[in-house]
Structure formats: structure tokens, C-alpha cells
Image: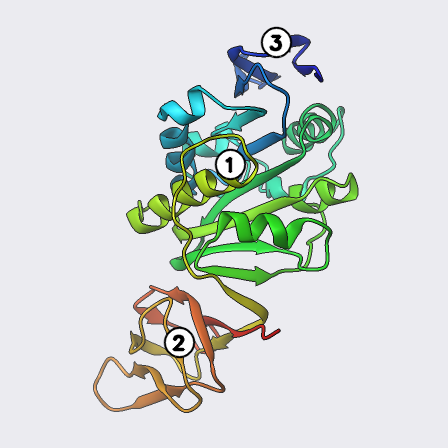
Amino acid sequence: MRDIIIHDEKILPGQSRDLILNSYPLHTKTHIEVPVFVNRSEEDGPVVLFCAGMHGEETNGIEIIRRLMLRDEIKNLRRGSIIFIPVLNTISFLFGSRDLPDGKDLNRCFPGSSKGSLGSRIAYDITTHIIPQIDCGVDFHTGGAKINNYPQIRCVFDFPGNLELAEKFSAPFIIDSSYREGTLRQEAAKKGKPILVYEGGESMRFDYPSINEGVNGCLRLLYGLGMIEFEVPAVRSVKIHSDSWIRASASGFFHLAKSNGSHMNKGDLLGVICNPFGEVEHKIYAPDDGFIFGVNNQPVVNQGDALIHWGKEKTD
């Protein structure tokens, strides 16, 4: 049975430990720490990473992990191990901000450097000390800048094992999403470790359907890996093979006519942009058949703003 070692501390089979990934000194003589929690079964099996809080204002994922850690099924794994990192970016979480104090996005800092910026050093520790020990994982995110994402898993369909894991998770939408440079997901893929990205809800706002779906998806994934005995019924997953944004054709008040998560037919009325003085109205129509899985909740929009994230279903 393989060893799991966090910050030079070995977690033995059957143990549950609360540890620190690393401590990062600030100019105020204080330190930023990244807490890590590990649950191990006495029986060998997959090692799964659940991490959230990559961006400090993405609270839904943090709540998903908090709820998971409290469950008896998680505390008493049938086999395998789970590594939890509920708040990866603790300093941004303190300020409720997306970016690090130097303006960088932590999810563009991978693989990082032990001698780099704060974000680069956190990324380096994840890349060096966590990714090599796992078999797969889920990185939890939410929409940003007033964007509400319908519960969805993003993965690369052609990457070995990605789609199979996504189907075990069984979110309402599974989206074929290419890797972005400097991300945790891309860096893990280079090492042959599939990381799913779960998106649900909106920044700095609890979205309970998205939270519940995230918890249930994790339980389905763990059940599918034989790590727990508690089975959650799967939901129908729509596989999206191509996606794009419908953007504002004018500035004004945006009123959405279709609900997030719904199917649309070509020509359907999706929304209206109104001049606040009652003089002009711009109607937005569906460019093709597809599904809506992200909407802009900002009432006032400018011409060119992203309004509706939609995609086409993959057909076998």
C-alpha cells in the first residue's frame, strides 16, 4: 500500500489527519497556511483529490467539501484515500477576491516555482507534493463576474479516463473543455492524472442546487470507484461537444427569457435588452439548437458583454 506524505508527515492506512501543505511568510511577519485533510482506509484503493477555493470568492466549492468531510461514508471509506484541500487560496479567501494580492490568478501559476511569487510557490507545492500522490481529482469552481453556471463538469473527452470519471460524477452537463495554460488541470494531465473541473453557481453567493449536485456527484464518483457503499442515483448528463457565448448586441437592461439549464431551439427568444428610458428594445434569439448552461445575472450590460453560455449536444 502506497505512502501518502504531506509536509514530511506520513499518513498511515486507516488514519485521518489534519495537516498543513506549507507555510508562506508575508512581509507582516505573519504566515499564510494551506490546510490539508486526509482520510485513509485500511484497504488499498484510489487516491482522490477534492480541492476548492482556487479563487477566494468561489464559496460553493468550499461548502461542497465541508459537507463531504462531515459524512460518515467519507469518514469510513471502504477502500482508498481522499485528500481534501477546502481552501487552496487562503489569502484571497480572506479578502473575498478572485486574484492574489499581486494581481495574479493562482490557476495560471502552475507548475510554479519554489522561489517564485506567492501563487507560484503554492502551485509548486501542489504540483510537487500533491499531484504525484493522487490518481484523479475534482477541482471546484463557480462562475465569476455575475455569471451563474448551471452544475457542470468540464473535462477533455479525448484524455484517457476523463470522460469515464465525468460519467461517474454524472453532473447535468459534461462539457468538452480544452486545457488552459498554467492551470492545475493541465499540469495534472501532463502527469497522467485526470482532474475534473466542477462549475456551479455564482461567486460570493451560495447556490444550494449547485452545492447539492456537487456533493451528490462526488458521492457518485466515490461509489463508482468502489470507495464507498452509499449509492446516489445518477442524473441524465448532457454531453456538450462545442460551446460559445451569446453576447449583447446593445447596452441597457438585460432581461433573460429562458432559464439556466434549459434546452433552446433555433429562433427561440432568449432575452431582451431594453433602453432604460423606454425607447429601444433589442431582442436576442437562439442562433441554433442547444442547451444553456451559464447566464449573466448582471442587470445592466454593455454592448459585447457575454450574456448566455450555450453549447451543442454530442451525439454518438
Residue type at numbered disc 1: Leu
Residue projecting furthest to the left: 278
Tell me how far mark 3 sits from mark 1, CA to CA. 20 Å
Q: Which residue is mark 2?
A: 263
Q: CA distance from mark 2 to mark 1?
A: 30 Å
Amino acid type of the residue tagged 3 in the rendering: Leu
Q: Tell me which numbered mark, 2 or 1, is placed earlier along the sequence.
A: 1
Q: Earlier in the sequence, mark 3 or mark 1?
A: 3
Mark 3 and mark 2: span between their CA atoms?
48 Å
Pick the quarter of the image with the N terminus: top right
Tell me the residue that label 1 is attached to. Answer: 222
Front in this rendered view, residue 275 or 79: 79
Residue carrying label 3? 12
Residue 245 locus on image (x, y percent): 51, 73
Label 1 SS: helix
Callout 3 secondary element: loop
Q: Residues within 10 Å of mark 2 (few under 14, many from 20)?
A: some
Secondary structure beneath dot 2 equals strand
Q: Where 85 sits versus 153, above or below?
A: above
Q: Residues within 10 Å of mark 3 (few under 14, many from 20)?
A: some
- The x, y position of residue 104, in whole percent, is 61, 42
> Number of labelled discs?
3
Q: Quadrant of residue 60?
A: top left
Residue 197 position, x and y percent, is 56, 48
